[in-house]
Image (cartoon, helix red, strand yellow):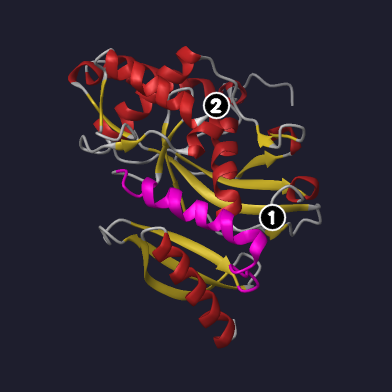
């Protein structure tokens, strides 16, 4: 990356981060999967610089473009709130798995196999309060048709739907958490996007499912992994994952608070678990065990036992 381009991008990111309540802790030159130059920024909360996240952008990215600026600002504003979570790198699946997302190598790169796809690699780890062992190395592939939907193949424009596609693929039993293994595919196609609604489509949910989902998030991300620190409930990324609105998530949270399962913050955006919710530990641990059994391919066991006609 030329010094001028790196300096210009750094100035753009610094200004955008400051507007969102973040600060640039550090920046360094990097390369993407194909060896193209990038800049890797460590962003921290202005109010608590110890809470950080990584933002990696390609050399050609121009944050001052009018058609990109607003969406990047929204991404950074959401990051500011998400960084107030005790474990901002951890997410929860609709079927009960607490997961940590790490080592995603942005931006997208083109496939080296000749396929007309863009790829991003990363890792997903089971985080259930025990030492992290089970994980999946993932390769999320975005078709050229799908790529036309997003404004740029960069982290601020794709991180949410990629994380949600990974969770959706896990929900479907098409990703296995293992102690070691090769990369597993996560296909991201136009089936995840409604062209007439102009919005992403992952998991249809009803009111009860959303209540259960919010309760599970608070149990794991605050009660188990977060030492009882508050978790942001009104995250648009979570609303996208369960095909709902932030307003509906707020409705679910209010219902749980009235039931005495969560304690809401004064602004109603964050929550911690009550003793009543933490008393459901056996239920949540059973859900994890059931989902781990579901995503473990049965054919592997059959092949190990010699039950195969290959």
Give the secondary structure at mark 1.
loop
The picture places residue 68, in percent across and down from the top left corner, at 63, 60
Q: Which residue corresponds to the image point at 68% horizontal and 21% vertical from the top-left?
A: 308
Residue 269 visible (yes or no): yes
Q: Determine whether 203 is above or below 141 in the image.
A: above
The picture places residue 278, in percent across and down from the top left corner, at 23, 21
Check disc 1: other Cα within 10 Å, few if <14, some if 14-19, many if 20+: few
Give the farthest residue toward the left: 275
The picture places residue 170, in percent across and down from the top left corner, at 55, 31
Task: Give the residues in magenta.
Answer: 59-85
Checking the image for residue 244, the label placed there is: 2
Q: Which residue corresponds to the image point at 41% horizontal and 21% vertical from the top-left?
A: 251
Q: Which residue corresponds to the image point at 65% horizontal and 31% vertical from the top-left?
A: 201
- Residue 46: image quadrant is bottom left
> Magenta segment, principal secondary structure?
helix
Q: Determine whether 116 is above or below 267 in the image.
A: below
Whether 62 is among the magenta residues is: yes
Q: Is residue 22 left or right of residue 2?
A: left
Q: Which residue corresponds to the image point at 42% horizontal and 62% vertical from the top-left?
A: 19
* Residue designated by label 1: 151
Whether 290 is among the magenta residues is: no
Q: Is residue 108 left or right of residue 149?
A: left
The picture places residue 111, in percent across and down from the top left corner, at 73, 57
Alpha carbons under labels 2 and 1: distance apart: 23 Å
- Nearer-the-camera pick, 65 or 133: 65
- Residue 58: image quadrant is bottom right
Q: Across the whole image, how many numbered discs are drawn on residues?
A: 2
Checking the image for residue 125, the label placed there is: none
Residue 129 visible (yes or no): no
Give the secondary structure at mark 2.
loop
Q: State the quadrant of the N terminus.
A: bottom right
């Amino acid at each position: 990356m030329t010094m001028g381009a790196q300096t210009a991008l750094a100035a753009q990111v610094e200004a955008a981060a400051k507007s969102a309540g973040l600060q640039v802790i550090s920046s360094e030159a990097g390369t993407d999967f194909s060896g193209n130059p990038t800049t890797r920024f460590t962003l921290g909360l202005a109010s608590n610089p110890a809470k950080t996240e990584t933002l990696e952008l390609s050399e050609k990215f121009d944050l001052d473009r009018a058609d990109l600026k607003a969406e990047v600002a929204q991404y950074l504003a959401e990051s500011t709130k998400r960084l107030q979570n005790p474990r901002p790198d951890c997410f929860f699946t609709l079927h009960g798995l607490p997961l940590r997302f790490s080592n995603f190598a942005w931006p997208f790169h083109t496939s080296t196999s000749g396929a007309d796809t863009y790829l991003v690699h990363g890792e997903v780890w089971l985080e259930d309060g025990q030492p992290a062992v089970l994980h999946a190395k993932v390769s999320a592939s975005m078709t050229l048709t799908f790529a036309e939907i997003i404004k740029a193949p960069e982290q601020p424009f794709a991180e949410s739907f990629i994380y949600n596609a990974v969770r959706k693929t896990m929900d479907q039993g098409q990703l296995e958490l293992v102690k070691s293994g090769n990369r597993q595919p996560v296909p991201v196609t136009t089936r995840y996007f409604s062209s007439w609604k102009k919005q992403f489509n992952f998991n249809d949910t009803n009111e009860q499912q959303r209540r259960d989902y919010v309760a599970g998030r608070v149990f794991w991300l605050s009660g188990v992994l977060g030492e009882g620190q508050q978790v942001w409930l009104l995250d648009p990324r979570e609303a996208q994952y369960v095909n709902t609105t932030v307003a509906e998530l707020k409705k679910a949270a209010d219902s749980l608070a009235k039931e005495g399962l969560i304690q809401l913050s004064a602004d109603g955006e964050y929550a911690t678990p009550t003793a009543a919710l933490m008393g459901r530990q056996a239920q949540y641990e059973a859900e994890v065990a059931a989902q781990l059994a579901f995503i473990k391919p049965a054919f592997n066991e059959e092949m190990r036992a010699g039950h195969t006609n290959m």
